[in-house]
Image (tube, coloured by chain):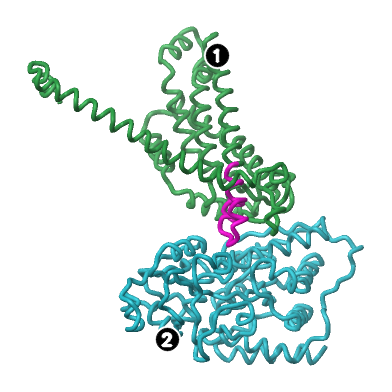
Chain colours: A green, B cyan
Amino acid sequence: MVSAGIVGAKATGLGVWRTVRERTFVIACMFATLFALFALVVLFYGIVRDGWGALSWDFITNFPSRRAAKAGIYSALVGTLWLMGLTTVVTVPLGVGAAVYLEEFAPKNRLTAFIQLNISNLAGVPSIVYGLLGLTIFVRGLQLERSLAAGALTLSLLILPVVITAAQEALRAVPRAYREASLAIGATTWETVRDHVLPQAVPSIITGIILGLSRAIGETAPLITIGAFAFVTFLPSGPMDKFTALPIQIFDWASRPQAAFHELAAGGILVLMAVLLLFNSLAIGLRLYAERKIIRL
Amino acid sequence: MKGSSVGVFALAIAVAGCGGGSGSASENGSAAEALSGEIVVDGSSTVLPISEAMSEEFTAEHPDVRVPVAASGTGGGFKKFANKEVDVSDASRPIKESEVEACAANGVEFIELPVAFDGLTLAVNAQNDWVDHLTLAELKAIWEPNSQVRYWSDVRPSWPKIEIKLYGAGHDSGTFDYFTEAVVGSEGSIRSDYTGSEDDNTLVQGVAGDKGALGFFGFNYYVENKDKIRAVPIDAGRGPIVPSEETIRSGEYSPLSRPLFIYVRRDAADRPEVAAFVEFYLSNAVEIVPETGYVPLTAEIYDLVAARFKKRTTGSVFQGGSQVGMKFEEILSKETGEQ
């Protein structure tokens, strides 16, 4: 490339060729973007077309039913909100804590390098494997049965690698000078991390958590593996209660023979997307707030 | 071994049904006595719609009882059942010997209760105008492992040389177990080059979009898609039989009409809410089962099944191979005799 560039700069004939290549590259990139967007638009259009009719207040506040006209997603929606809440509560302290330890405190030796390698690898493990792990450890080992707690802990395991990695990168991006300045005036490492490093990293950490939760909210396989229920006509009143969740309810409806249930499934997908967007905008708001605080510092 | 038991079941239960049951054993009539607790139902996704409907109606009557229903599959359900994690296990095939042993190893006893019939439908594309019927032997030739059938003309020379594309249940389902046992003759053996899916809607779409297709799936998936696909009459030695509610119920469509079951844990049946739920299940099945797209047993047979539950008769009538049918008949007539 370098030699081609030099030659091209000398001979204008080759300069034209360079421009053509550049244009081609830009068009190819645009095409790739449009293709992804197009697929998304088609999918979205199909779901809205099929599911719009299913949406109503009754659909949100009714329990599932064998009669499609009466069926709603109340228990699944509430189950998903519970799951997301509990997963956040478990994941944030563990994920951020692990990242802070690995970045700020842990000695750089073979053991931590090995741990680091494992965390990166865990991010690529198929979600059903986490389901099996959750079934063995939480459902059976800890006797949590098929409770929200078991589901949330399983989902936490699933997204922890993503959250830890993102938080580590956020911490790494904080300039070294901040730490040195703090330590130089006599602050301990803990004080430095608490008052200077973490606040700087918070916006990026939040992004990592959003990514993790967005993945967790749509996961079906691990929840089915731990035995989450497909038909639930009560609301969970605590973390030890049995539950269902939106992806499972959608999956159940989509596999029915009757077309009316397929419509409900599409409606369920719209609700799931709305919840996801709500979560994300909440997190983006938090992120903006955190960023503004940093600028004031 | 179990191959012959699937067909025998319908006959056995029908013969025993002639004995007649003395009224419904299920009216608990004690609505005033408030039941509470939680009944965990899991198992076959084929039976799921029936159990869901029962859960819905039962909890409407008994609001303090929770009946969550899951669908881990017939095999997955039995695994959890043997582990005492499930009170009622839905099954689209009889319990296997290995599953009976797993239950025994954990001290789990069970009550086997048939609750409905389903017909496995073999369907072709709506544009397929050559297939009038298929015999069981032809089906076996098409589906068996290392089958040489590639074109429809390989099945019958008079049929066109159009490639035959096969769609069927994936390996994890009870439907797969049942089909391979009833058609190929040994459970789990099938040619490897067919399109398998656990989602029957995918199979329907496959058959609907492919002129040369042949697929098998639950009868209710055919009923909902009659405009796109055509059911093939099956000749099992008594002439071609079209799957319909009548032929499935009467056993004429045997061996591709299959019973669906619930298995109740014996110790769970001592809990009043579980007993009430199972009694509710059996006494309302005649009305509720058709609403879910399945074929109900006759009222007389439900009475016999309810009597079986009332006596808490444990064990499977399908244990020990092909003489099983007789055994089931004996059990049922003995039960009715004593009533």
Say if residue A140 shows up in the picture. no
Where residue A280 sits, quadrant-wise, is: top right
Q: Secondary structure at mark 1?
A: helix
- Same subunit, labels 2 and 1: the answer reads no
Residue at the image point whose x is 62% and y is 35% from the top: A89
Residue at the extreme right of the image, as rendered: B32
Q: Quadrant of the C terminus of chain B?
A: bottom right
Q: Nearer the viewer, residue A290 or B171?
A: B171
Instruction: Indicate the position of residue B118 as horizontal and vertical percent values.
Output: 60, 74
Instruction: Indicate the position of residue A30 as horizontal and vertical percent values.
Output: 33, 31
Residue at the image point whose x is 41% and y is 44% from the top: A124
Instruction: Indicate the position of residue A91 as horizontal and vertical percent values.
Output: 56, 36
Q: Amino acid at mark 2?
A: Ala
Instruction: Indicate the position of residue A215 as horizontal and vertical percent values.
Output: 51, 40
Examine the structure image and report whether residue A255 is included in the region drawn in magenta.
Answer: yes
- Residue B299 left/right relative to A155: right
- Residue A110 left/right relative to A137: left
How many residues crowd around disc 1 within 10 Å: few (fewer than 14), some, or many (20 or more)? few
Q: Main secondary structure of the magenta part?
A: helix
The residue that mark 1 highlights is A292
Which of the numbered marks, if any, corresponds to residue B137? 2
Q: Nearer the viewer, residue A172 or A72?
A: A72
Say if residue B283 shows up in the picture. yes
Examine the structure image and report whether residue B126 is included in the region drawn in magenta.
Answer: no
Nearer mark to the viewer, of 2 and 1: 2
Q: Give the magenta part as a residue range.
A: A248-270
On screen, residue B157 above or below A287: below
On screen, residue A190 above or below B190: above
